[in-house]
Amino acid sequence: MSAPEMEERMENYTITCCSTADMSRQFMEDNRVPYVMFHYQIDGKDYPDDLYSSISPSAFYKQIADGAQPVTSQVNVEEYRALFEPVLQQGRDVLHLALSSGISGTVNSANLAKAQLEEAYPGRQVIVIDSLAASSGFGLLLTQALENQKKGMGLEENAAWLEQNKLRLHHWFFTTDLTSFIRGGRVSKVAGFFGQTLNICPLLNVNSEGKLIPRTKHRGKKQVMRAMIKQMEEHARGGHDYDGKCYISHSDRREDAEAVAKTVEELFPKLDGRVLINDIGTVIGSHTGPGTVALFFWGDERSL
């Protein structure tokens, strides 16, 4: 394929996503990714999930540690129309990656906007991908979609690749603070009380339905860190020869995230670049609270 032909294939569609991919504003700007913002509310006031443009991660998580209980809301149809329509007006199609349907119903709103706009713009196309992913795992899928486009994949070819491979993206999380999980009902008050007392740290992952599932319990941070890294050793594509990208996101636990990243880089010397560390955004963070560290990589197909 000639350079002009490849450029035409890249330019005839735009990749979009929502803010819950938990990538930095700089990443979105550098890669020219239009995104739509979820929202969260504290004390009845609404705030956009604006990739920490209006609040710092430390200030946001301090509010939660001090007792704030954020409530989140998903993107509605009109907001998706506002994301997609300018692209269609420029004569390009849209490939949109949406937050996992196992966590949010936002993919339904995206598909309603798609139907309305494809009727309004005959000949133009919007493809919505249910990422079955969250946080920077969603961001890793977005990164791959962008790389596929740069390699010359057209709209439908890229969408097909994402559908065929999205379950090969692994998400492993641990938390050292169960407070928000108790508030949100993911952990019962009784289990949470004993968990906090005994310093229990659960290890969770995102399953094949895109839902966050508790898997194992560990006594203390060091044990749960080792257990999470062991999952990468067991499931990463190529084992210790893994040569893909690895992302980590965290909610006000930079030191823990850096400790995990250091170990991963030592165990997997063929990584594609350094481990990228991101902050968990305000919407996902509203549910995890402070104390969460998440690890994302490509591996075997997750089936449970």
Image (tube, grey):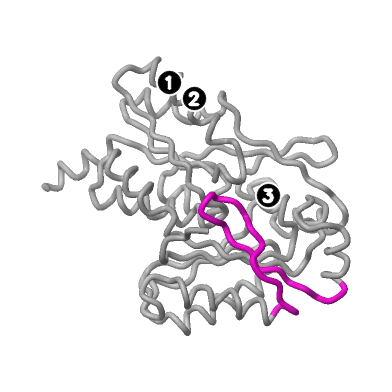
Q: Which residues are magenta?
A: 197-221
Q: Nearer the viewer, residue 92 or 298?
A: 298
Which residue does the image show at 61% across and 45% down from the upper left? 103
Residue 282 left/right relative to 107: right
Disc 3 target residue? 282
* Left or right position of 124 against 280: left
**Residue in the picture at 55% in, 50% down:** 210
The quadrant in which residue 290 appears is: bottom right
* SS for dot 3: helix
Residue drawn at x 44%, y 55% as measured from the top left: 167
Amino acid at pointer 3: Thr
Residue 133 placed where, x, y %? 52, 51
Could you tell me the amino acid type at mark 1? Leu
Indicate left or right for 175 with 4 as reference. right
Which residue position holds label 1? 117
What secondary structure is marked by label 2? helix
* Residue 274 in picture, x, y percent from top left: 45, 73
Helix, strand or loop for disc 1 = helix
Q: Which residue is mark 2?
A: 113
Amino acid residing under circle 2:
Ala
Nearer to me, 154 or 33? 154
* Dominant secondary structure of the residues highlighted in magenta in the image: strand
Q: Residues at badges 2 and 1 in contact (C-beta under 8 Å)? A: yes
- Judge depth for marks 2 and 3 and give the one in front: 2
Q: Position of residue 45 (x, y in %)?
A: 80, 35
Question: In the rendered structure, does residue 219 fall within the stretch colored magenta?
Answer: yes
Mark sitting earlier along the chain (1/3): 1
